[in-house]
Amino acid sequence: MSAVIEMKGIGKSFPGVRANDNINLTVNEGEIHVLLGENGAGKTTLMNILYGLYTPDEGEIYVKGKKVRISNPNVAISLGIGMVHQHFMLVPPFTVAENIVLGLEPKKGLSLDMEKAIADVEELSKKYELKVDPGAKIQDISVGMQQRVEILKTLYRGAEILILDEPTAVLTPQEIEELGVILKSLVSQGKSIILITHKLKEVMSMSDRVTIIRRGKVIDTLKTSETTMEELAEKMVGRKVSLNVEKAEAKVGNPVLQVKGLRALDHRGIEAVKGIDLEVRSGEILGIAGVDGNGQNELVQAITGLNKVESGEVILNGKNITNLTPKEITDSGVGYIPEDRHKRGLVLNFSLYENSILGSQRNKKFKKGMGLDYRKIREYSRRLIKEFDVRTPNERVNARSLSGGNQQKLIIARELDREPSLLIASQPTRGLDVGAIEFVHQRLIEQRDKGKAVLLVSLELDEIMDLSDRIAVMYDGKIVGIVNARETNEFELGIMMAGGKSEEKH
Amino acid sequence: MESRMDEIKSTLRNTIKEILYPLTAIIVSFIVGGILVYAFGNNPFAAYKALFLGALGDLNKLGETLVTTTTLILTGLSVAFAYRCGLFNIGAEGQYIMGSVAAVWVGWAFQGLPSILHVTITLLAGALAGGIWAGIVGWLKAKVGSHEVINSIMMNYIAMNLSNYLIMTALNEPGKAFSYEVAPTAKLWRFAESFEQFKYSRLHIGIIIAIIIAFIAYYLLNKTITGYEIRAVGFNPSASEYGGINVKRNIVLAMVISGLFSGLAGGIQTAGVQYRVNNLFGLTGYGFDGISVALVANNNPIGVLLSAFLFGVLQKGGPMMQIEGIPKEVVGIIQGIILLFVASNFVRITVQRYKENKEIKSYMKKEEVK
Ligand SMILES: Nc1ncnc2c1ncn2[C@@H]1O[C@H](COP(=O)(O)OP(=O)(O)OP(=O)(O)O)[C@@H](O)[C@H]1O
Ligand SMILES: [Mg+2]
């Protein structure tokens, strides 16, 4: 077992943050090595350094024992290092084969030799058991497929060492399992893999060794077989973390949200919500489970006014709010943690204090004369930052400069502080570390215990089962069943998520 | 009281932060321009001396420079304001023309009004005309999604031809290729009326109006709810929608406000300098210069004041360089270099790198002390 990558004493700073501090990392040939750490710990930064996107302030890198200077990604590629970023970098209208060969196209004379490209891709896909359809367009294939394309792209460029930054954050449980198989097969063919993930289950099932990073420093490197999830969580956060959600008996009250016969279209104009009846009562968490793309987002957006309701009714506390504007709906007491924090939740170029009032900018308490009372707003945001432990140098930096988890905390802080009677949380913990997840879960349960109604949409079955009091399963724009969270299991939910009916039990 | 000081401080801090890079770009551009002049076999110091003396040599010259600056401030504000909402108002030109025509009509059609009233309605008419003209473009964008750049270019030519038509018909001074003159009561107060030193310049009260407007624009953009919403839409329409902001309304609103500034520029030029509107053979260029002014000012309204003054100096002083035997195109080159530097963010990136390093070092020190 020899080391393919050795990073020694790596340091990297950004204004106000020491992102990497004297980091040592050794990756052995043929292993899957996980980088584990809180949001903002510096994992992505370290991998960006290895891939030549950032230059380190100090430290040395050795590839297969040879000291190298990786000044840009081309150098990394020529050293056999490939990286799959969390946000894919594919050309949507191009085919799978075109995307894979992009930049290294086989040529016939002056033109692209499409036949050879397809043959190459097919050969590669067979060799590594990564099934793809070379002729399909990227825009028509699933996220999981797109990820395979990204992996094939690095292999086509001769990658021996693959870096995968949070590859599972966007995948369905099914796809995650498939990815696990793919990674095992890659390793068996001599590749080495560095994997970033926040999900401890995946760490346990997929990896050989784990390096834990906290606040830019390496805490430990462990053999996966010799550790436990609890130990990993504790090392990563620096304190004991409860991996199980503890909650008291629900004290359910009157219905807060009533949805009746709701129909809505998706952005292409195709019906995505096909007649939904739903009720969320005060003091309960209703979880919506389902495979991605079964109308969950459209349902939420129709309730919050971001998407038009074609027919049916949305009633909040007895008041009809169907097709009101998002502002009117917010003002009637709906808080919404959106699934896409960059697209919806934040104005990345706004400071944290400006973001802290998004949605409440017309609230009287932030007004002074004709203008906004920015002194008060800054004070207000400082309070949110403190209460919700948003890690940031100050409230004046742009939201863009925060790590994903901290951006999410800011959004949650803002939405909860409005004291909504209905809180809609869509993928509230996507991309968060276990510490932050614990925090978010506690906040959601707190809302429930305060007698609010919580509508939780998540692709994570564990999260749905841990938090919800009742679970509604969505399939193909409809609710196929609503079950009591205590009386169900993963298996039953799985069947329903695939469109099967649950056996009636109440 | 303390909060007032805070406000002022934060305004200053914001402005300095936003114009620091363009400022450096300007200095670098002058140096590069100087080297060029030298390479052409001329003395750069003599050239710049001629430039600055030509623009600022005495109060009359300064006055003329400020006359140009006034217009540039307003068209610059116009472009900058729209840009903050993510809109590229290339139609400042047309809005300016509509502003001048509206002003000349109100200035001429009403007679015997008290001057203060007449001046006010004349300028308001100009601003309003510009606002409506830009509003059409904003409305088209919000309603049918057609791009503001294409539409405002077309609106520029419609404005020019409409203006020419009106000047040759309803507003025509018989036998001439220009409009009637505005009534004396509609003319802006000139410095020359009270100050002997400005006798040979047309400097008028408009410069003060323009400066006030710049501060209003700054306040509006950075301190009010409207400004907050406009900027939010400019950065991220989806998040704005989520935040309960009416995106379409704000697009129209930002265009209207932007148009008010350009229209006012036209009104002020008419009521303060020309008193008439000429039959145009081509676009005036003030609107396009506004784009350069806004770009150099990094779309900061206070920065626009300085940037407009710089362009005013270059435009007024440029011709004086010819006396030194230097082709006046050199001024064009310097302007070009400034824009190039600013647009390419060259200075910004260099300085940022340096600053980051420094900040980190001081942060690390603080951490160590802890
Ligand atoms: N380009 C940048 N400019 C300024 N600060 C940055 C930049 N990139 C990262 N940082 C900061 O460096 C720290 C480490 O960020 P990094 O993205 O490496 O974290 P991470 O471990 O990948 O977190 P996450 O799990 O949330 O993705 C954070 O505090 C972040 O705010
Ligand atoms: Mg990361």
Image (cartoon, coloured by chain):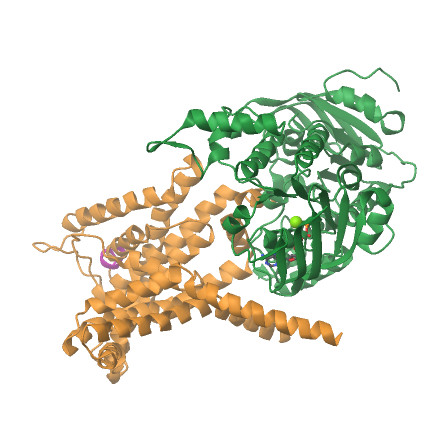
Left or right placement of residue B85 versus residue B273 in this view: right
Residue at image position (45%, 38%) is: A104
The residue lying furthest to the left in this view is B175
Q: Is residue B196 in sight in this rendering? A: yes
Left or right placement of residue B93 versus residue B217 in this view: left
Picture colour for chain B: orange
Quadrant of the image for the C terminus of chain A? top right
Does residue B109 show up magenta in the picture? yes
Residue B50 percent across, percent down from the top left: 22, 79
- Magenta span of residues: B106-110
Nearer-the-camera pick, A446 or B223: A446
Left or right placement of residue A38 versus residue B292 in this view: right
* Most common secondary structure along the magenta stretch: helix
Residue A136 percent across, percent down from the top left: 51, 24
Picture colour for chain A: green
Nearer-the-camera pick, A464 or B65: A464
Does residue B337 show up magenta in the picture? no
Residue A75 percent across, percent down from the top left: 52, 51
Residue at image position (63%, 74%) is: B362
